[in-house]
């Protein structure tokens, strides 16, 4: 009876241990970081036309490459991806001298949702993908309310009524109308417009920073608040006085197309009740939400027309352009290069301005000039764009660089305009050819040169060539002693000639071996030498300071080989710590030589183990 009870207890214990092991395994598996995506939504309430910030927080991905984030289309709103912000954290843990470094990356995918209707909007799922691995967020639902526009507040986005062109500078503005009886009750206004949320489509010219005391207008964007310089004036509409805050910016369209900008919106808090604080000042005790929106707007952007486009068009759009050409020299030989400098000025954006081909009979004829195939990008200097192009002159009959045309498109006139540079006077000389006579010149007859005697004792004539074989001894020398009369110097020269390549080969092998060394091995060797020297230096220090140095040096060496457990080393570390942390330990006496010797031995053994592990 007792044996059966014992067996049942054993089986129960086995089942319990198996269950515990399964739970531990499940916990370890779940502890591994797996990709996860959570959606963070801005605090409610939500209103039609008022953008909502959405942050998709992604964890468990590698630091690189950057993940791709997307969201399911929203029925009743427009969803735009603003950007992806990485956040990398590094954690260093030191346990018993062993250093562990862990790195984790978190990505924030920023979206902006602009509701277009009231009711419940379904959000998600949002997906983040990296290297074939995906993380999805749950599906959410948010309630959206409709605010009745308040007639005391207006917002107007000022855009050109007719189409604009790529590269054209245009003035855009935004006006905030506020009833005068409301200006003292406004708090925390927010203005939103899609025009300021499209940096890849519209680029704004750098604004001047508002000076202190100047009126400003703040625009809320996903990348932060943009504060613009503004002007304030009083206007009236239907007999009601308004304060109008107006800000302007210069915009350049980067791509053609029809862009739906939606409606600009403004929301603010109107204080309906005030109360006095402890110091007698007023503070709001009750507020009401006030909302206004502009009508839906579109901006049409077109390319410069291709019909009647001249060959000298370089992409400039605007008005009042001028064109200048200068040369670094005006007297050249045929085939020599000339550096031409082209300068373009005008009332328009210079960023998209380039150079036309300048090839053809109406520009630089190809049989008279040779141009490089690549066109320079140019640089903007003091309101002008400058290009430098080398040109070779091929025709000796040329007497000028002709006037060159440069065309641009004037959007106000709706047609192309052309300006011409001034011609440049040119003198082209024939190219000089070098003959054999130019390389080896004949010796002048009038030069007095001592003429050597010939073999028969006669003098050479002044015009006779010195380099002559007449009378030369062309017999072959057979006397070995005369041929080897400088045998010692020849032997030394041969040894030098054969030895120098061998030395160079040996030096290259040493250099290659040093270059191919593992940087980690070099680091370990440097730390080993440093810690051995540290132990040697500790022998002459006071006991408490010496034991602290010895223990620290041994731990640094042990960290280089974290899996090596040595009882002798641990025992020595315990003795050092016991003395070092003892309140009554004497700090003036010298460290015991036996402890120092044990530390030397253990450190040397550990360094030898590290050296063997490298091979």
Image (cartoon, grey):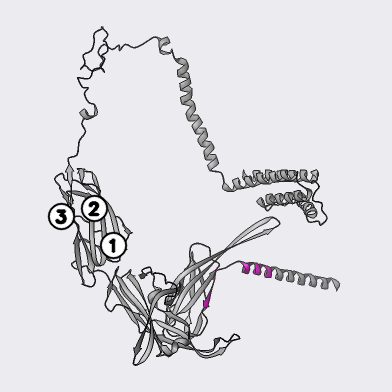
Residue 374 visible in this rendered orientation of the protein: no
Up/down of 122 relative to 335, above or below? below
Q: Earlier in the sequence, mark 2 or mark 1?
A: 2
Pointer 2 with pointer 1, Cβ within 8 A = no
Residue occupying the far bottom of the picture: 239
How far apart marks 2 and 3 lie (CA) works out to: 20 Å
- Within 10 Å of the Cα at label 1, are there few (<14), some (14-19), or many (20+) other Cα atoms? many
Whether label 3 touches label 1, CB < 8 Å: no
Q: Quadrant of the C terminus?
A: top right
Q: Quadrant of residue 485?
A: top left
Q: Position of residue 150 (x, y in %)?
A: 42, 90
State yes or no: residue 188 in magenta. no
470 or 407, which is in the foreground?
407
Q: What kind of element bears circle 2? A: strand
Foreground residue, 54 or 154?
154
Q: Between tags 3 and 1, which lies in front? A: 1
Q: Residue at x 41, y 88 (%)?
A: 180
Picture coordinates of residue 513 (x, y %)? 54, 40
Question: Counting residues from the N terminus, which is met first, the one under dot 3 or under dot 1?
Answer: 1
Q: Residue at x 48, y 62 (%)?
A: 65
Residue at (51% x, 73% y) in the render:
56
Is 86 on the left-hand or right-hand side of 455?
Answer: right
Q: Which residue is mark 1?
A: 353
Please state which of residues 276 and 85 is positioned toward the viewer in this rendering: 276
- Residue topped by disc 3: 361
Asked if residue 25 is among those painted magenta in the image, a careful observer would answer: yes
Q: Residue furthest right?
A: 2
**Extent of the magenta region:** 23-43
Q: Which residue is mark 2?
A: 326
């Amino acid at each position: 009876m007792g044996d059966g009870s014992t067996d049942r207890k054993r089986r129960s214990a086995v089942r319990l241990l198996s269950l515990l092991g399964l739970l531990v395994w499940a916990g370890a598996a779940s502890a591994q970081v797996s990709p996860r995506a959570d959606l963070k939504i801005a605090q409610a309430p939500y209103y039609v036309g008022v953008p909502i910030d959405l942050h998709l927080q992604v964890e468990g991905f590698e630091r690189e490459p950057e993940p791709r984030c997307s969201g399911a289309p929203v029925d009743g709103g427009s969803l735009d991806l603003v950007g992806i912000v990485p956040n990398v954290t590094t954690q260093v843990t030191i346990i018993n001298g062993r250093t562990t470094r862990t790195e984790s990356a978190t990505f924030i995918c920023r979206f902006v949702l602009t509701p277009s209707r009231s009711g419940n909007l379904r959000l998600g799922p949002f997906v983040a993908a990296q290297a074939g691995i995906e993380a999805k967020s749950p599906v959410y639902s948010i309630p959206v309310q409709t605010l009745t526009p308040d007639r005391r507040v207006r917002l107007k986005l000022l855009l050109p009524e007719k189409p604009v062109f790529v590269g054209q500078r245009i003035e855009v503005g935004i006006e905030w109308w506020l009833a005068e009886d409301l200006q003292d009750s406004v708090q925390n206004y927010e203005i939103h417009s899609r025009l300021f949320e499209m940096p890849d489509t519209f680029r704004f010219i750098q604004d001047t920073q508002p000076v202190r005391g100047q009126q400003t207008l703040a625009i809320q964007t996903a990348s932060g608040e943009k504060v613009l310089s503004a002007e304030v004036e009083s206007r009236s509409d239907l007999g009601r006085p308004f304060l109008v805050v107006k800000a302007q910016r210069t915009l350049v369209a980067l791509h053609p197309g029809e862009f739906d900008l939606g409606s600009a919106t403004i929301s603010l808090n109107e204080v309906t009740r005030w109360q006095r604080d402890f110091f007698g000042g007023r503070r709001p005790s009750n507020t009401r939400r006030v909302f206004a929106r502009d009508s839906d707007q579109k901006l049409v952007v077109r390319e410069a027309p291709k019909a009647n486009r001249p060959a000298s068009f370089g992409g400039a759009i605007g008005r009042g352009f001028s064109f200048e050409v200068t040369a670094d020299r005006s007297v050249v030989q045929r085939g020599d290069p000339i550096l031409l400098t082209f300068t373009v000025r005008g009332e328009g954006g210079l960023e998209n301005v380039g150079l036309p081909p300048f090839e053809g009979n109406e520009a630089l004829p190809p049989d008279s000039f040779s141009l490089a195939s690549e066109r320079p990008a140019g640089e903007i200097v003091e309101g002008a764009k400058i290009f430098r192009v080398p040109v070779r002159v091929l025709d000796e009959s040329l007497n000028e660089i002709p006037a060159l045309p440069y065309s641009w498109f004037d959007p106000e006139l709706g047609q192309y305009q052309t300006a011409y540079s001034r011609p440049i006077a040119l003198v082209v000389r024939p190219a000089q050819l070098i003959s054999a006579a130019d390389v080896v010149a004949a010796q002048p007859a009038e030069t007095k040169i001592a003429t050597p005697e010939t073999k028969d004792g006669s003098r050479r004539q002044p015009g006779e060539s010195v380099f002559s074989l007449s009378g030369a001894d062309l017999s072959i020398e057979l006397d070995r002693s005369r041929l080897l009369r400088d045998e010692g110097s020849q032997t030394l020269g041969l040894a030098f000639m054969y030895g120098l390549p061998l030395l160079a080969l040996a030096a290259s092998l040493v250099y290659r071996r040093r270059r191919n060394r593992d940087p980690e091995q070099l680091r370990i060797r440097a730390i080993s030498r440093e810690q051995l020297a540290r132990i040697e230096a500790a022998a002459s220090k006071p006991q408490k300071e010496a034991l602290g140095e010895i223990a620290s040096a041994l731990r640094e060496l042990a960290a280089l080989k974290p899996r090596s457990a040595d009882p002798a080393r641990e025992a020595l570390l315990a003795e050092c710590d016991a003395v070092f942390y003892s309140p009554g330990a004497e700090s003036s006496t010298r460290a015991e030589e036996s402890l120092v010797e044990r530390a030397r031995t253990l450190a040397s053994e550990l360094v030898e183990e590290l050296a063997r592990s490298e091979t």
